[in-house]
Amino acid sequence: MSSMAGVSTNNSAISTWEKNKPYQITILHTNDHHGRFWQNDIGEYGLAAQKTVVDQIRQEVTAKGGKLLLLSGGDINTGVPESDVLQAKPDFMGMSEIGYDAMAVGNHEFDHPLSIIREQQKWANFPFLSANTYFKNSENRVFDAYKMFDLNGIRVAVFGLTTDDTIFLASPKNTNGVEFRATLPEAQKIITQIKTSERPDMIIAVTHMGHYDNGEHGTMAPGDVELARGLPAGDLNMIVGGHSQNPVCMASPNTRITEYVPGTPCAPDQQNGTWIVQAHEWGKYVGRADFIFLNGKLTLQNYQLIPINLKKEVDNNNGTKKLEYYTKEIPQNKQLLDSLTPYQEQGKQQLLTKSGQLTGRLEGDRNIVRYQQSNMGQLLLSAFIEKTGADIGVMSGGMIRDSLIEGNITYRDILKVEPFGNSVIYFNLTGTELIDYLKVAISKNPGSGGYAHFKNLTITKDGDNIIDVKVKNEPIDLQKSYRIATLDFLAAGGDGYPVTNTLPSYVDTGYRDADAVKQYFETHSPINAADYEPIQFIFEK
């Protein structure tokens, strides 16, 4: 599968479009699918309804003599247990049925080892693209860099890029022997190669790098805005993005609408002559960009995000609420629904066992857990501490993927919170070493996946200096050895944390994170969310 070049559909590399004739080209896109092959509990999104929308647009565009590409910004894996236990087979097969043309390789593709990714490539009848993912110490790419498409004689190149943060974000055992090179130089390299060997009329990047307003990417690797600005104007017509999981709908230049309302107009970003689009996450939308190609020039005529059965709560004015579609109901494609049903049933059977009972809500929303301590973080760390007999628990907010609401809690619910299958581990540090470790942990910016959650710990800071630490309300003893519980992902240096899996005291319990949480629920139910409210853990002098 490795590739020095891409895949060309036309070896002659000659455009055959006619002068003074307008051509319609429509680009459809999704990103950050994260296992959502099936609709959710209230009938939102799902591949069967997505297929209905894509089929309708395909028919409409074809009837007008136009051509269409359907692209994904990556991260097909990890998020819904029924998909996770089947290694996203229903997702890739469903996407093939819908007719995807290409996808970017996302960091969550590396939640699996390469052997599984190669299986997934067989289930998908479309290419996985990444120009900057190489086998270490070689010029051999792990995936194809680009693919050429001939749309009514217009030569369109689509190349892929994967965030270079993947080396921190994925489990090191899955990226062993692989490297993710800086995206901008690799983009420059592949665009030069494409222009020389393919003579394209249009170049699109499918990326999994993130959209950051005005290119302000903080501690994350550079994203789509920085890519567009770093290339010569006119080199790249469009970026179909992913990773930051937001609808890229601009309120004004360099400022995204913070609370985009489904069904309302959406203006994509434009930087340095490059259109940048992203369709939030989970197949909640299909993005649609209609271009006119005339005499070598491309003009965006229309852009929209089409909501896939997204619903809102509406007040009945009698103290009750009902759900209404933001736009209109989209029927599910029966054929695709029928072929996905056995997978849904197969996954379900493994997951519906009750593990315990919850009163209240445990908060796992990414807009909370990447910015502040939450009761969910405290509960998870309580489970890891109980499993290891540790003094302190630490994890990053990016490892918390969902909330839990009041009622019976099943293994499926827990797997939505902890879908990655990380191992619970522990290691020992002296008080002095612990302070050095904490300096790194608390330096992670709010908003990043690395933002640290702690249990049994309070820290007093003076500027960037840690001047006091208490462990379980006792002043830290610099000579004493403390046991720290976390997950193997962080211990391997994930999210840029210190590497601790080489310490002599390192122990991998062999317990999957979700299994430790399941056992905690079984032991302590009914669990009251109020008992896990976080205390203030950082004090400024």
Image (cartoon, helix red, strand yellow):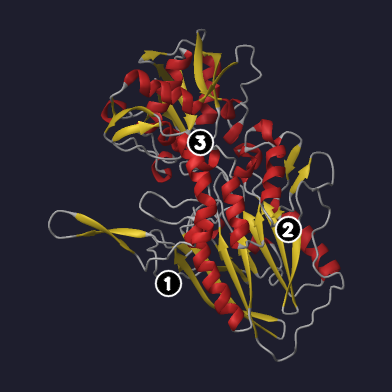
Disc ID at residue 187: 2
List the single residue furthest toward the left. Answer: 318
Residue type at numbered disc 2: Ala
Q: Which residue is mark 3?
A: 419
Between discs 1 and 2, the one toward the N terminus? 2
Residue type at numbered disc 1: Pro
The local secondary structure at tag 3 comes to loop
Eyeballing the image, is 289 above or below 367?
below
Residue at position x 43%, y 64% in the image: 331
Residue at position x 68%, y 39% in the image: 116
List the single residue furthest toward the top. Answer: 480
Give left or right: position of 164 versus 336. right
Instruction: Name the front one of labels 1 and 2.
Output: 1
Between discs 1 and 3, the one toward the N terminus? 1
Q: CA distance from mark 1 to mark 3?
A: 34 Å
Disc ID at residue 265: 1
Residue 476, x across and y down, in percent: 44, 13
Residue 497, x across and y down, in percent: 58, 30
Q: Nearer the viewer, residue 533 or 478?
A: 533
Q: CA distance from mark 1 to mark 2?
A: 31 Å
Q: Inspect this view and state whether residue 307 appears.
A: yes
Crowd tier of the residue under label 1, counting other residues whose Cα lies within 10 Å: few below 14, some 14–19, many 20 or above = some
The local secondary structure at tag 1 comes to loop
Crowd tier of the residue under label 2, counting other residues whose Cα lies within 10 Å: few below 14, some 14–19, many 20 or above = many
Give left or right: position of 519 versus 277. left
Eyeballing the image, is 314 above or below 203?
above
Q: Nearer the viewer, residue 297 or 440?
A: 297
Between discs 3 and 2, the one toward the N terminus? 2
Give left or right: position of 137 versus 391. right
